[in-house]
Amino acid sequence: MLFKISTRLLFILSSWVCSVTAQTLVVKDVTTVTPKMNGIVTTQTRQWIKIVDGRITKISSEPIATSDDSQLINGTGKYLIPGLMDSHVHTQTMPGLNWSKPLIKLQQAFMRQQPRSYLYYGVTQILDPSLTAHAVKAFEHAPLNPDIFFCGAAPIVGGYNLLGASFKQAIARRPYFIHRPDKDGEPPEGFKPENHTPEAVVKRMKQDGARCIKVYVEDGFDLNSGWPMISLDLLKRVRHAASEHGLLVMAHANALDMQEIALEADVDVLAHGMWNWLNEHSIGGLPKPIQEIADEIVKTNTAYQPTLNVMRSLRDVNVKDHLLIGGYSKVVPQEILDWYHTEQGHWFAQEMRQGWGTDDLNLITRRQTQVLQQGERVLAYLYQKGHPMLLATDTPPAPTYASQPGISAYMELQAMHEVGITLPDLLKAATLNNALTFGIEQDYGSVEVGKVANLLLLDEDPLESVEAYDSIDTVILHGNPIARESLQANKIQH
């Protein structure tokens, strides 16, 4: 009897504690704009939204009663949308950093601001496709941060993502690398090859909490083709192991021939647009080989990340005064902006000019714009065929300071809209499409009861202009409202 009384008392006490500590937020009289699973984007005016302990519990056209300890936000004249997701980012290094010792403080300043920069531009979910569980925990240690998901990177020794790396360096830098016994040479003492087969690597990623495996189908940039590359046989073994463990396969591939190989390996996600056409050219439409690959993407329903930000940011690092665009000062700490304007801060642009063999910036930017436009043409073709799009920036794709967290997502949305993607489909690309692709649609991607309350309160309607994504009033992260202006760079309290 004593046990039963004690158990009942504990239940009552725990229920009381839960009721006292539950965090409740109500947004009143707001217009919701959200994609639905049926593909339609709906707008509902004069809605009341109740959020309890970080999840949406009620959506009503009638007023919702609030208690004294509830938070209340007046949404009159504002628009509530799902938080955005950038499904291709890299979170470990400051854009444009070269690793000289005096710059460690800049890296530290970047890491403090980075999560806030994503939130400033409404990105409440990110996916880093080349991370580890340990790095995820380090990112989540920040006081405020978007929800982060990751893929494990599975390069080969000496191949892209491990270019020039020795066997020992591969072991230290990429825990999920795939060993090729016939190509990699004599392994270091103590190396266990059985831990680096496609099957073992995929199994470990699953155990570590990865959502996908990233492979690198890359033999060289532009017309170059001399880099070691994973074989089709190994790719197919990765594909089979990933299917067994319920993981996606994402492929780095941006050239015509590389995307053809990736599709033959039955990858789930192409992590880049097809902007490298090799020797193919056409004035109007797409060259036949490009169109054939694009048609195969549609036929196989392969997820497609345009990542227009890659070529844009590689071009813009050579554009004079690019960093004077107003948005950068909102998300880049002043000490980092000051360094970018020094000669040392331009090291990557100088290196690019050496690679081009010219200091003619007009020539370089024209060529990079042409490559960017090739990617835009493929994107437009796929969209016209009804293929769903994803917001993914690959921030930063290289040591270019023109690709910064958060603002790159906004620029990507602008670029996608300029290509012809309608505003309703742009909202889907930034929210529900990403959630569906990566299997998190039960929690994210729309304003619906039961979902995580990662939401944006906008001053403007995202179905009226793409600039609405820069009119954020409040970021709601797990039910906690955050004034956008408080997320600006240089407002962190040290």
Image (cartoon, rainbow, N blue to C red):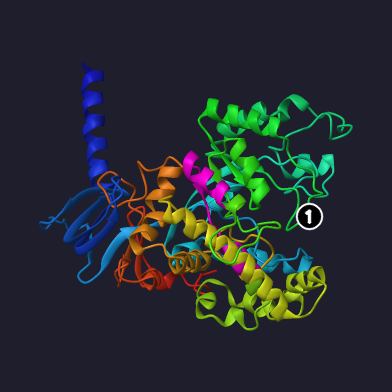
Identify residue for label 1.
Answer: 224
Q: Which residue is pictured at 27% across the width and 36% down the height?
A: 14
Residue 430 position within the rendered picture, expressed as x and y whole percent measured from the top left: 42, 57
Span of residues in magenta: 291-314
Q: Amino acid at mark 1?
A: Asn
- Residue 396 visible in this rendered orientation of the protein: yes
User: Measuring 50% from the left and 69% from the top, which residue is drawn there?
Assistant: 411
Spot occupied by residue 302 in the image (x, y as percentages of width and height): 50, 43
Find residue 110 and report its image quarter: bottom right
* Residue 280 location (% of width, % of height): 67, 58
- Of residues 160 and 50, the one nearer the viewer is 160
Q: Main secondary structure of the magenta part?
A: helix
In the picture, which quadrant includes the N terminus? top left
Observer able to see residue 128: no
Residue for point 54% across, 28% down: 243
Question: In the depicted view, which residue is nearer to us: 192 or 441?
Answer: 441
**Image quadrant containing the C terminus:** bottom right
Outermost residue to the top: 1
Q: Residues within 10 Å of mark 1 (few under 14, many from 20)?
A: few
Q: Secondary structure at mark 1?
A: loop
The answer to which image quadrant residue 346 occupies is bottom right
The x and y percentages for residue 173 are: 74, 45
